Amino acid sequence: MITQEKIVDFIRSRPGLKIPPLEKEAGIPPQTLSKALLANASKIPAKHLPAIEKVLRQYGYTDNFSEGHRPAQVISIVNHKGGVGKTTTVINLAKALSLYGLKVLMIDMDSQGNLSQCYNVHEPKQQVIDSLLSDANIPIVSIDDNLDLAPSDIRMAARESDLTNSIGSERRLTIKINQIRDQYDYILIDCPPSLGICTTCSLVASDGCIVPIQAEASAYHGVANLLNHISDIRTYANPILNIKGFVFTMIDKRLNLHADMMEHIKNSFKGVHIFDTVISQSKAVKESQVAKEDLFTSDPTSVPWTQYKTLATELLNL
């Protein structure tokens, strides 16, 4: 069972966590946790420990928790098929993690710049490609509490060939990330819909990747190429790269076609973890995209927002 010491250590390791909401979620009296966090801590009644543990597990607490700070996990959100929800997944997964008290950096590696545009960062003077082709640090824009962005736009497309022809091109993003890695808990990279140099750089720099995938035949056929690319990167550039999992997006559970295709994909890629969380097809997602907002801001009661929070919890517990 969880102890008061572990509760205090975990909450102190997540300075972004708000105590009153935690107490409310756990159904315990106000200031129970606040008083325990003071230097002269009061004792948390043993009867409240199970409820507190249940809530903290939703925020990433595990039995193996250690209070020592670890450098950020770097995760690429990748699929070379466009329109599968990569950027939407980055935006909402990052927001959920930040609300769980974790410091998150989003890196826009797509020259379309959709991630950056979502936060009204247009034509940034300093962007990711500039840092990859110079001694400059990755440019960082503060978006919200615990949430930062490294922006990009169409200028990246014009300079991709320069990056490709640069010495150590595939490792340049790794070097830049390592300079700031200890400032974050998670770094999420929004990859472009291709297997070119920007995706390769992202995967070489990553500890793992998440693959958003639709329950469609075209999406299924493209995944094999992506898995081969990941395998090559493991072999020749980044042996620690692992697939955190496939996450099904834009799913209508009323359609037998979607249910059948999800089952087919699960059976075809049995060695790959598939997240239990499924992201539903929803008007709320489209409306958030038009509004250029995350789902927490545009519709916090929506089904997809609840699903992205659950996905964040799944990721924390891997």
Image (tube, rainbow, N blue to C red):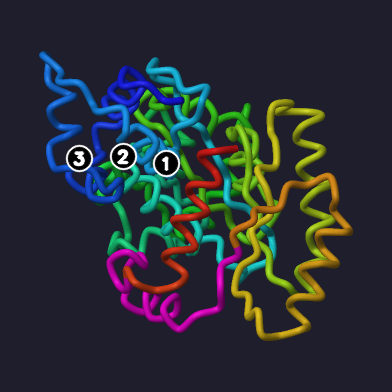
Disc ID at residue 129: none
Q: Label 2: how many residues lie within 10 Å, few (<14), some (14-19) or many (20+)?
A: many
Q: Which residue is mark 1?
A: 54
Res 243 seen here = yes
Label 1 sits on a secondary structure element that is: helix
Q: CA distance from mark 1 to mark 3?
A: 15 Å
Depth check, mark 2 against mark 3: the one in front is 3
Q: Between residue 242 and residue 312, name the one nearer to us.
A: 312
Q: Which residue is mark 3?
A: 19
Determine the image quadrant of residue 296.
bottom left
* Residue at figure coordinates x 42%, y 65% from the top left: 305
* Residue at figure coordinates x 75%, y 75% from the top left: 259
Q: Amino acid at mark 3?
A: Ile
N-terminal of the pair, mark 2 or mark 3, is 3
Residue 253 on image: x %, y %: 65, 79
Q: Is residue 282 left or right of residue 9?
A: right
Q: Which residues are magenta?
A: 278-299
* Residue at figure coordinates x 30%, y 61% from the top left: 119
Residue 284 shown in magenta: yes
Res 158 seen here = no
Q: Which residue is mark 2?
A: 101
N-terminal of the pair, mark 1 or mark 2, is 1
Residue 313 on image: x %, y %: 49, 47
Instruction: Name the outermost residue toward the front.
Output: 47
